[in-house]
Amino acid sequence: MSSLRHLRLVSSVALILQGCADAPTAPPRIERLSAEKLEASLPQPAAAMPLEQIVALARLGLPAEELIGRIKQSGSRYRLSASQIVELAGQGVPLGVLDHMVASERTRIFDDMAGEVERREKLCRDRSEQELRQCRAQIPMQWFPGQHPFMNCLPPTAGWPHWRCL
């Protein structure tokens, strides 16, 4: 008799748990940029000091620190390929100058990307706050007595409060 009760209890619990189980929410889909799209979206570097001038100054024996100073002063930016780096090194441009040219462009790209991410996050926060204000303005206060009258305005999904922006 107790085994029959035990079987009923186990089957009841299994049915209850099955009713409570829900399919897990899928994480938001993130669209990735291809390398070509990313390269096209990046601003083109501006070289006020052409590479030929850097090579000429390096051949004159200008120290690397002075060349770097002139590049900084001119505000030049270079996006060098691997073959261009090898070619410039073969023409006598010091490795420190080449390192500076690559590192400064990489830093500029990362800073631009971080700025874009911050801009998008701010837009998303502003939009979420606006949606929350609109939701709260539509719900009369007397419907929800208690300490938290606007809980149904909050999106109950993972990643809140910016889940809509992903």
Image: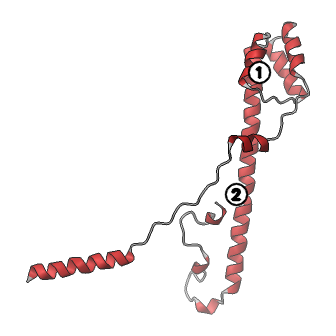
> Measured from the top left, where is residue 87 in percent x and y?
76, 15
> Measured from the top left, where is residue 32 in percent x and y?
64, 49
| Screen quadrant of the C terminus | bottom right
Locate residue 146: give its quadrant. bottom right
Would you call the spot at circle 1 few (<14 residues within 10 Å), some (14-19), or many (20 or more)? few
| Screen quadrant of the N terminus | bottom left
137 lies above or below 21: below
The residue to which callout 2 is attached is 121
Locate residue 90: give its quadrant. top right
Q: Disc 1 on helix, strand or loop? A: helix
* Residue 55 numbered tag: none
- For badge 2, the amino acid type reads Glu
The residue to which callout 1 is attached is 84
22 lies above or below 114: below
- For badge 1, the amino acid type reads Gln
Position of 4 with respect to 149 (left or right) is left
Identify the residue at image location x=90%, y=27%. 74
